[in-house]
Amino acid sequence: MEKKRAGEVIEYAFVGLSGIIFILLASSWTSPLFPWAYGYDASWYSLCGRAIIEGKVPYRDYFDLKGPVLFFYEALGQFFIRGRNGIFLIQCISIVFTAVFLYKLSREYLNRLCSALVLLTFYFIEFSILWGGNTVEELFMPFNMAALYLTLKYLKNKRYDEVQTQSFVLGAGFGVMALSKITVASAIISAVITVVFVLAVNKKWEKITEAAGFYIGGFALVCVPVLCYFGFRNSLHDFFFAVFQFALKRSTDYYEGFSLEWEKSLLIADAAFVFGLLMKGDTEEKKGQKLLIIVTSVVTYLLLHLGTPYMYYFLSLMPLFGLFLVLWMKNAGELITGILEKKTGAVDAVRRAVMVLLIIPAVGFWVQSTVDKAQENVIIRKYEINRQQVEDCIEINELVPEWERDDIFNLESGMIYYEVNRTLPANKYPVNLPYFMHLYPAIKDEVMDKLMIDRPKWIISEYIDGFDDEDIRNWVHEHYELVADNVGEELYRLAEP
């Protein structure tokens, strides 16, 4: 028994290590292998985490639309290691748990070799979608993978009276998603629908009530500390306004219509849906599997049509893809075994063959993207892309006396400047300011008051002439003088009266 347990520890250690190697090779904005590559989003999230460590409060001191759990997660990384390595640390934690839950899910139905192939295929597709790394979709993927693993195991063991752990984990996971970015919670939502449906079919009405209680308990475990954090800092209004009221404004204002490229990116969901329809539900367990993959396909597809389809948004497909891969590999094995043992009829063989062929559209669209991303990372590593920008950000910072660096007002500057120099902005809206002013004009009044009354001595901007507001642009030109202009930033100093 001890020998077997030691073998499992070693096995899962290699699974976790494979995830860390994946992040090392794929995450160009955070990996130590790419020391000169920085990303705006990754640097902004890291800044918010560092700000919390230094006593700032999200939404009150620095405005954004993402939920606070993401920033607390970033703060955890910054607590242990400041800067990029802190981001890399939390990415490693995330990918290790993602890989372990996917592998455990695979081992419920597949042998070690097939489970390893599932993991490698998963990494191959994720490589192309990861972007530069450090996104909500990536960091909270373990919660979705855990939901799918626990639900499939629940269906396999048919322990319908045991809803406590399952429901509590789903509730906590949904709390994390709801207070980060609700559109990434597709697998958790699907798991809840599946479990409730199975309990209802088996007429376990009292268990649905019990499950709801534990689910709410898990949700409260996440939400109550968050509410207390903002309540004790008199910032509940800031929190609710940014994450709910303002975020709703953005989602309705920037909603994009359908496009062919968007639909192609969702071929994984389409293929998984058809795969689910073709599955035979001749046992209770298979009925549950069929329901889970169909529901997850539909919910993922719908949620990914909300918002703007940036590449990294499609990381929300990966939990569904992991589930699809496992069931696909299981089906392929059954097809081969049935044919070799002459137990599969012609009609059933055709059905299973079609299910096997569905992997082509699911994977095919992303193959070239993965090849391109791998080549891009080689170029970034070899030619030290962005090195000049990093050095210019340092140069700009050194032009400001150290005792005045907390008086640098930011007008649509890249967050790379703050990540490189380990400083914090002096104003509340350091990112997406023109967009935020468009959505909520009162923000412009707040910014103009800051410029006209407080008159910050220094202003940085990536390109002030491209700033999308004429009043602010003219104010800077009339009252500030350009001190430096390089690839990194433009630096302006308040002109003497």
Image (cartoon, grey):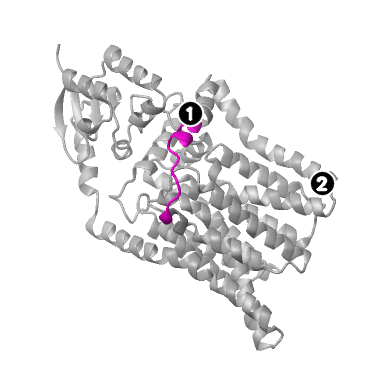
- Identify the secondary structure beneath mark 1: helix
User: Visible in this render: residue 152?
Assistant: yes
Q: Which residues are magenta?
A: 247-261
Q: Is residue 409 left or right of residue 272?
A: left
- Give the quarter of the image for residue 493: top left
Residue designated by label 1:
246
Q: Amino acid at mark 1?
A: Phe
User: Visible in this render: residue 333?
Assistant: no
Q: Amino acid at mark 2?
A: Lys
Instruction: Give the residue drawn at x 73%, y 52%.
Output: 195
The reply to whether the C-beta atoms of the residues labelled 1 and 2 are less than 8 Å apart is: no
* Image quarter in which the N terminus is found: bottom right
Q: Is residue 346 left or right of residue 320?
A: right
* Image quarter in which the C terminus is found: top left
Front-lying residue, 83 or 494:
494
Question: Nearer the viewer's eye, disc 1 or disc 2?
Answer: 1
Front-lying residue, 14 or 365:
365
Check the image and report above or below for 272 versus 430.
Answer: below
Q: Is residue 224 magenta?
A: no
Check the image and report above or below for 366 versus 80.
Answer: below
Q: Position of residue 72 (x, y in %)?
A: 51, 36
Q: Residues within 10 Å of mark 2 (few under 14, many from 20)?
A: some
Check the image and report above or below for 390 versus 345.
Answer: above
Q: Position of residue 163 (x, y in %)?
A: 77, 49
Q: Residues within 10 Å of mark 1 (few under 14, many from 20)?
A: some
- How many marks do you count on the picture? 2
Residue designated by label 2:
207
Dominant secondary-structure state across the stretch colored magenta:
helix
Instruction: Give the residue drawn at x 24%, y 43%.
Output: 390
Spatial CA distance of label 1 from label 2 is 38 Å
Check the image and report above or below for 357 versus 243.
Answer: below
